[in-house]
Image (spheres, grey):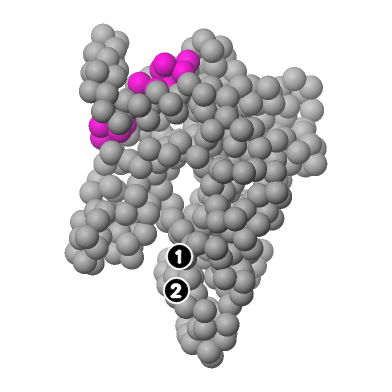
């Protein structure tokens, strides 16, 4: 299993200074986080695209290009590129450039986006939400497969035997599809033979198993001999002691989730809700390294996933907290999980299940 981190470059009140963190300071911290994740041996770092004041990353490829110059082995991905409101030609060119800068470590994770600001910003109609993504994903995959493109569609001027450059080191350049809870998205990814990232940021993980099954079924129906890889992407904080992780995570998580909830009609997060979310069957990976190891392995029994990405910076956590979480993920959690999955997963998962049974 590949294990890594993703971030949106959250920009909220700094709990240490009680001040709104500046964009330049948040970006400095983000690049340091990517560099440190590389140093501690993590496999992937991904950054997401937003066009809001509470996030600093609106151009993932630019951030990843900067990170490429500061890292050596870690894979550099978006999480996600909002492809529906972007131009597939430019997306491919930008990530091919990151691939060249990183000597073959770039990936594109595309999605329809969980926020809508990019649609009016770039002149798209939300009524075309699904059709935009479908058409633009097809074009992106054609560009990935062919240097010269002849193509026509509804949302972009046609291409007539035009070359798209530069071409990346990797052939093909990896493209992942991120999904929330939409069955059609999982089926689309599987039918195209594309890896799928499932965002589990609420509820219980078992509820998302059907997405994996739909993805696999669609891949086999489309004639693929193997099921494309699966990633589980979730929120969390790792600390040396479980209570420290809880105390550090809860205020930042609550601030961010309540802020988004006010826009979407969700009730405020309670401490009790958060406590369940960090239990074995909850969505958040908040706790000591051993608790996070057991939870990853518990979910592995459900999904048999190939990758796990943790969003540590949900809200503005103290920078040292984020760096310590990255360190524990890379030096303790990842080696233990990989060892367990390599042949010793049974006892670990049994231990996790026994622990949960004692809590129920």
Whole-percent x and y of residue 90?
A: 61, 70
Image side of residue 206 versus residue 123, left or right: left
In the picture of the structure, the residue carrying the numbered disc 1 is: 172
For this rendering, which residue is in front, 290 or 188? 290
- Residue 55, placed above or below residue 138: above
Whole-percent x and y of residue 185?
A: 36, 58
In the picture of the structure, the residue carrying the numbered disc 2 is: 145
Q: Quadrant of the N terminus?
A: top left
Whole-percent x and y of residue 221?
A: 19, 64
- Write the residue at 55% across / 63% down: 169
Residue 57 visible (yes or no): no
Image side of residue 320 versus residue 257, left or right: right
Whole-percent x and y of residue 266?
A: 49, 36
Q: Residues within 10 Å of mark 2 (few under 14, many from 20)?
A: few
- Write the residue at 32% across / 62% down: 193
The answer for how far apart the CA atoms under marks 2 and 1 are is: 7 Å
Q: Quadrant of the C terminus?
A: top left
Q: Is residue 300 magenta?
A: yes
Magenta region, mostly helix, strand or loop?
Answer: helix
Task: Provide the residue span drawn in magenta.
Answer: 288-302
Q: Do the residues labelled 2 and 1 touch (CB within 8 Å)?
A: yes
- Badge 1 element: loop
- Write the residue at 55% across / 80% down: 156
Residue 309 visible (yes or no): yes
Q: Which mark is residue 328?
A: none
Q: Is residue 252 magenta?
A: no
- Badge 2 element: helix
- Residue 350, placed above or below residue 22: above
Q: Which of the two labelled residues, at mark 2 and mark 1, occupies the earlier sequence position?
A: 2
């Amino acid at each position: 299993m590949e294990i890594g981190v993703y971030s949106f470059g959250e920009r909220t009140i700094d709990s240490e200074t009680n001040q709104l963190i500046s964009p330049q300071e948040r970006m400095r911290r983000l690049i340091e986080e990517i560099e440190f994740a590389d140093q501690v041996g993590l496999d992937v770092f991904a950054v997401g695209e937003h066009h809001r004041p509470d996030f600093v990353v609106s151009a993932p490829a630019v951030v990843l290009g900067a990170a490429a110059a500061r890292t050596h082995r870690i894979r550099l991905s978006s999480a996600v590129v909002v492809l529906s409101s972007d131009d597939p030609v430019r997306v491919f060119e930008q990530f091919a450039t990151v691939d060249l800068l990183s000597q073959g470590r770039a990936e594109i994770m595309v999605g329809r986006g969980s926020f809508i600001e990019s649609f009016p910003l770039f002149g798209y109609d939300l009524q075309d939400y699904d059709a935009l993504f479908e058409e633009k994903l097809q074009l992106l995959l054609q560009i990935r497969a062919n240097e010269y493109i002849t193509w026509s569609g509804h949302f972009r001027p046609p291409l007539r035997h035009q070359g798209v450059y530069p071409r990346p080191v990797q052939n093909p350049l990896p493209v992942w599809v991120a999904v929330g809870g939409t069955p059609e998205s999982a089926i689309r990814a599987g039918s195209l033979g594309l890896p799928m990232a499932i965002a589990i940021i609420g509820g219980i993980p078992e509820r998302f198993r059907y997405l994996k099954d739909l993805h696999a079924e669609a891949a086999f129906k489309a004639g693929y001999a193997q099921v494309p890889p699966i990633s589980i992407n979730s929120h969390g904080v790792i600390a040396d002691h479980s209570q420290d992780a809880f105390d550090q995570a809860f205020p930042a998580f609550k601030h961010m989730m309540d802020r988004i909830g006010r826009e979407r009609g969700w009730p405020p997060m309670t401490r009790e809700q958060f406590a369940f979310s960090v239990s074995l069957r909850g969505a958040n990976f908040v706790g000591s390294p051993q608790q996070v190891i057991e939870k990853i392995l518990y979910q592995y029994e459900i999904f048999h996933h190939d990758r796990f990405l943790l969003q540590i910076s949900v809200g503005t956590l103290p920078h040292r907290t984020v760096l310590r979480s990255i360190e524990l993920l890379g030096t303790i959690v990842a080696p233990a999980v990989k060892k367990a999955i390599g042949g010793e997963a049974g006892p670990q998962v049994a231990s996790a299940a026994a622990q949960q049974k004692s809590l129920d």
